Amino acid sequence: MPDTTIRSNTEVVLIGAGIMSATLGLILKELQPDIKIEIFERLDKAAAESSDAWNNAGTGHSAFCELNYTPEKKDGSIDPKKAISIAESFEVSRQFWAYLVEQKKIFSPENFIKSVPHLSFVWGDKNVEYLKKRFEALQKNQLFKEMVFSTDFSQLKEWMPLVMEGRDSSEKVAATSMALGTDVNFGELTRSIFNYLDGLEGVTMHFNHEVQKLKQREDKTWRIKITDLATGQKRKSYTKFVFIGAGGGSLPLLEKADVPEGKGFGGFPVSGQWLKCINPEVIAKHQAKVYGKASVGAPPMSVPHVDSRMINGEKQLLFGPFAGFSTRFLKNGSYSDLPLSIQRDNILPMISAGIKNIPLTKYLIQQVRQSPEDRIEALREYVPTAVAEDWVIERAGQRVQVIKKDEKEGGILEFGTEVITTADGSLSVLLGASPGASTAVSIMIDLVGRCFKEELASTNWQEKLKIMIPSYGQSLNDNPVLSNEIRKNTAAVLKLNN
């Protein structure tokens, strides 16, 4: 039988057609227009997994309202470092998106980003005290200076009428508000970027193509074996650099790559569901993203929020997400994903992390066992007047939390984003979830710095990055004049009203 395998040579292979691959591909193409890129996606369209609007929080994670980014230390003080870092990263993303719109590489920013206030809401003496301390710790920073704190019932009712409706006015409540907040449809944004990329010379996109094997050759290039799921056609791609941005599918591919840097990593999958409002009158009453405090042991993706969204051109109102457990690593994955991911090098870290995270296990069991009535009761803590008939269950995305080897702990469960890069810079893999999409531009620029060191050091690449991201190399939090100027400019280009 003749060998009918299709072979191709390229400089960059991107595995997974989500927001990370889209961002990296476009950054590289802007920095080096003649670079050759191949993109492989196992599904039939871009952004169908983690980047899809129903599978992603869409908050425009800027740490304005997410309380898990500002932990309370043992001495009672608030640590704002992570929140400031995430806020900086989101400003970088906004600049990049504004650049793409200005350069007419993507169009109609109103289709993927809109102004929506970000609120944090709590009740009870202890939580009100925490929120006030959080406000004081953040508001003195430039990126959060417009944050407003209030315990006034009438003020809170003005900010979020649906959440305050039916509440006892004597209840001890507090909220912070950031009018600068946004709602981002990362699915729409991702598809817009790929539509542009796909029309460029040197870029080839392959949908319904699944990567089967990766192997680094003696000359440090990679041979990737791929199957066309629609036709069964086999393909081999030879490349200098591989990026794996396949969401929950990244861990199995990292294991197939068999690199020393990937040893000891495991994954813990967490599924999710939304309560989606189907009553237009109720949907119209709410225009904010209202985040509360997570339950003890809850993963960050399960922080409860009443969320005003724009999805496929329609205003939506969601509550949740409710967490669950599935052995799938992807929404469109297989129940064998978790068992097949267990290897000799990660079994001990996974067992160790499991033992240390009993509260998470208990929390997930409780979530799985919840009845529809239980979910409505949870909703009523945030929307007291909620009626069961107005809400239906909508399946959310699948996330794989990172488990990694630790010399002291044996294994630790990480809730953030982890980028693994080989020593020679020829392979980079993105694992993890939150804050993910919102900080994609910063993550990918950092990745370029690791994997294209010499090129990034060149005057040409440095100048181009400063055009794409005017604040590149500077801290907006430490520069009020620059921060105000950039926020004003990006708001104008992206058609934001705040």
Image (cartoon, helix red, strand yellow):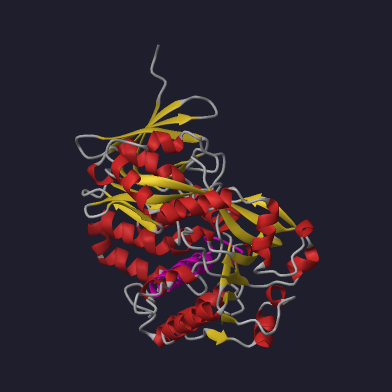
Closest to the observer, 63 or 23: 63
What is the x, y in percent for residue 172?
Answer: 61, 82
Residue 106 on the magenta segment? yes
Closest to the observer, 468 or 183: 183
Question: Image height check: is 231 above or below 320?
Answer: above
Residue 23 on the magenta segment? no
Q: Is 254 left, or right, of 217 in this rendering?
A: right
What is the x, y in percent for residue 147?
Answer: 52, 84
Residue visible at 51% across and 85% down? 146
What is the x, y in percent for residue 356?
Answer: 35, 53
Quarter of the image holding residue 161?
A: bottom right
Question: Image height check: is 305 above or below 74?
Answer: above
Q: Which residues are magenta?
A: 84-109
What is the x, y in percent for residue 40?
Answer: 45, 40
Quarter of the image holding residue 23?
A: bottom left
Q: Is 278 left, or right, of 139 in this rendering?
A: right
**Residue with the most extreme left position:** 218
Residue visible at 62% across and 51% down? 370
Q: Is residue 318 visible?
A: no
Indicate the quadrant containing the C terminus: top left, top right, bottom left or bottom right: bottom right
Closest to the observer, 352 or 158: 352
Residue visible at 49% across and 30% down? 228
Q: Is residue 350 visible?
A: yes
Indicate the quadrant containing the N terminus: top left, top right, bottom left or bottom right: top left
Question: Image height check: is 403 above or below 462?
Answer: above
**Residue with the most extreme top position:** 1
Secondary structure mainly formed by the magenta segment: helix
Residue visible at 55% across and 56% down? 56
